[in-house]
Amino acid sequence: MGNSIERKWYVVDANGKVLGRLASKVARILRGKHKPEYAPHIDVGDHVIVINAAGIVLTGKKASQKEMTRYSGYPGGLKRIKYEKLLKDKPEFVVEKAIKGMLPHTKLGRKMAKKLRVYAGPDHPHQAQKPEPLEID
């Protein structure tokens, strides 16, 4: 089944979309769960391009209260960054992190994550792959 997998390219507009809802639907496509030939041990997912990541929305007070933490391993090495600042500085990272968190945390999940491309603006360099627009509510 290795070479017979047909992979499509989809483009998703994230402008005005809620982060978690968008991430779960994109993760489903990357995983291949929308296909009849889906199997948990095989990567049958499609490629996804997310554009306008800067326009993503967090509901409620999440933007001001939710934090991304990083720990260096050293005493006092815990770094906390509010999502408000992350959305302003690195919107691509916020969307990528949400989607990757919904994929398996294994070799297979890392392979699936390579099929994701996120761009802050409306332009992407993948016109040659003829991506189909995918509407996510």
Image (tube, helix red, strand yellow):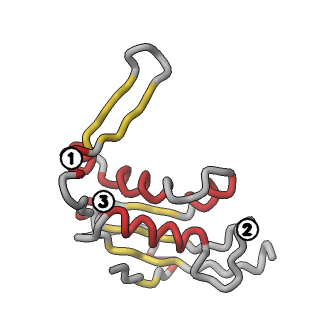
Mark 3 to mark 1 CA distance (whole Å): 15 Å
Disc 2 packing (10 Å; few <14; some 14–19; many ≥20): some
The foreground one among 47 and 124 is 47
Residue tagged by mark 1? Answer: 84
Determine whether the residue tagged by mark 3 lies in a helix, strand or loop: loop
Determine whether the residue tagged by mark 1 lies in a helix, strand or loop: helix
For the point 69% across and 52% down, which residue is it? 107
Task: Mark 3 vs mark 2: give the one in front.
Answer: 2
Residue tagged by mark 2? Answer: 42
Amino acid tagged 3: Ala
The earlier-in-sequence mark between 3 and 1 is 1
Residue tagged by mark 3? Answer: 120
Q: Are marks 1 and 2 in contact (CB under 8 Å)?
A: no
Q: Is residue 9 above or below residue 92?
A: below
Percent x, y for residue 131? 47, 80
The earlier-in-sequence mark between 3 and 2 is 2
